[in-house]
Amino acid sequence: MTSHEVHISKRLAWIQDELETLKASGLYNTIRTISSAQGAWLEVDGRRVLNFCSNNYLGLANHPRLVAAAREVLARYGVGPAAVRSIAGTLDLHLELERRLAAFKRVEAAVTFQSGFCANLAAIPALVGKEDVIFSDELNHASIIDGCRLSGARIVRYAHCDPNDLEQKIQEAQGTYRRGLVVTDGVFSMDGDVAPLDQIYAISSKYDLMLMVDDAHGEGVLGEGGRGIVDHFGLHGKVDVEVGTFSKAFGVVGGAVAGSSLVVEWLRQRGRPFLFSSAVPAADVAATIAAIDVLEESTELVDRLWENARYFKAEMRRLGFDTGQSVTPITPIMLGEAPLAQQFSRELFSEGVFAMAIGYPTVPKGKARIRVMLSAAHSREDLDRGLEAFARVGKRLGVIAG
Ligand code: PMP
């Protein structure tokens, strides 16, 4: 070993220590390798397995119309955007997607970002700063938390989905800030519960606060034909910022903010990921527009997703599993301790079912679970295969009665 290498390994030795700690505490994240297109079945680590992991709610990630739209545009526009939109000009396709998304969501305007994560990092610091306050649900997604931190505003966490606690926290903060923002996930990704957005809106408007919802898991799922949580509660024009992602039900990649023209214009001027990072490539934009076409033409996929979710949940409960507070296709199977959830997930995999164990710190200690992500891509036979595997493993591990 040269002295140079010794020097490097010394200054990075702390990383090795941290990784060992993660491994010892069972928190090391081992990532499986997928070598097939997304769908009800996947090839994972060389095995064909039933897919209960992905956010491909409507099966659009490998839909022939989306793939064809991307291919066609690829031939015309090539692969990369080559620059940041605000500096070197925006593609007509991005503007078309923004118009189509606003129309689909029945709001005035929309602006797209590279991801849902970027949309949160763009929106929150553009709306609030050091003199301001954010009221944030305690279980909000990491990208909301990071957006809040980046803004420099004071962050006040309120109890999960609890409008009374929100109001109390707002009252306690009265007179201590310039502007205020209430922010919540629409559908919470680990529990599948839905924020009481109508009540949250009533409170935020009573105190004249801006309101933002991250509808990553509600788009394509809630509302008429999958128009999302704002549509579900009939709050068009009332929620100031509706963050979305194209990486889940829409089956592609990218993020967006939909809302008033005023907010959208402001984000084009002040949303830092919009201003300083290159946009999503044209082929993905075209595929996303095709996803909106599919959703606008028929509610078939959304209906099938809900049918699958209702069937699977009812059958899991009948088998004796605890499916938590979920009212959406996100279905947690509550198991308690993390080692049990991990063992459950491993045994499911050996039964040919890919479903992730989720433990602390993603969810509270003692609330480890398997999270089943249902999709319109699953057939009834797929769901029955999954249910049989859950039943076998559940009995073997003593989670349900044998
Ligand atoms: N918000 C929520 C609630 C999410 O679950 C996710 C994805 N896990 C994101 C934002 C980020 O979306 P994207 O993958 O498009 O960055």
Image (cartoon, rainbow, N blue to C red):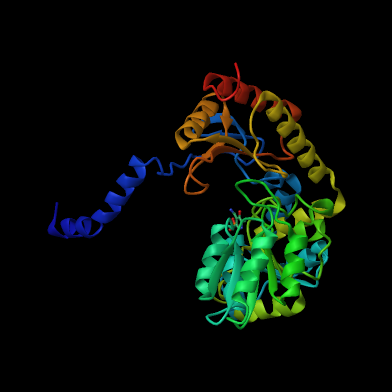
Q: Residue at x 72, y 51 (%)?
A: 66
Which residue is situated farthest in the right direction here?
Answer: 297
User: In what quadrant does ligand 1 lie?
Assistant: bottom right
Instruction: Indicate the position of residue 347 as horizontal and vertical percent values.
Output: 51, 26
User: Is residue 277 something that shows in the picture?
Assistant: no
User: Is residue 140 something that shows in the picture?
Assistant: yes
Q: Quadrant of residue 111?
A: bottom right
Q: Quadrant of residue 30?
A: top left
Instruction: Describe residue 141's horizontal placement relative to residue 263 as left or right.
Output: left
Total numbered labels: 0
**Quadrant housing the C terminus:** top right
> Can you say whether 248 is above or below 368 in the image?
below
Instruction: Indicate the position of residue 151 as horizontal and vertical percent values.
Output: 53, 74
Which residue is situated farthest in the top direction here?
Answer: 402
> Can you say whether 23 is above or below 349 in the image?
below
Instruction: Indicate the position of residue 397 as horizontal and vertical percent values.
Output: 52, 22
> Can you say whether 400 is above or below 178 in the image?
above
Foreground: 363 or 1? 363
Q: Residue at x 68, y 43 (%)?
A: 326
Instruction: Describe residue 72's horizontal placement relative to residue 273 as left or right.
Output: right
Instruction: Indicate the position of residue 126 as horizontal and vertical percent values.
Output: 60, 77
Q: Quadrant of residue 209?
A: bottom right
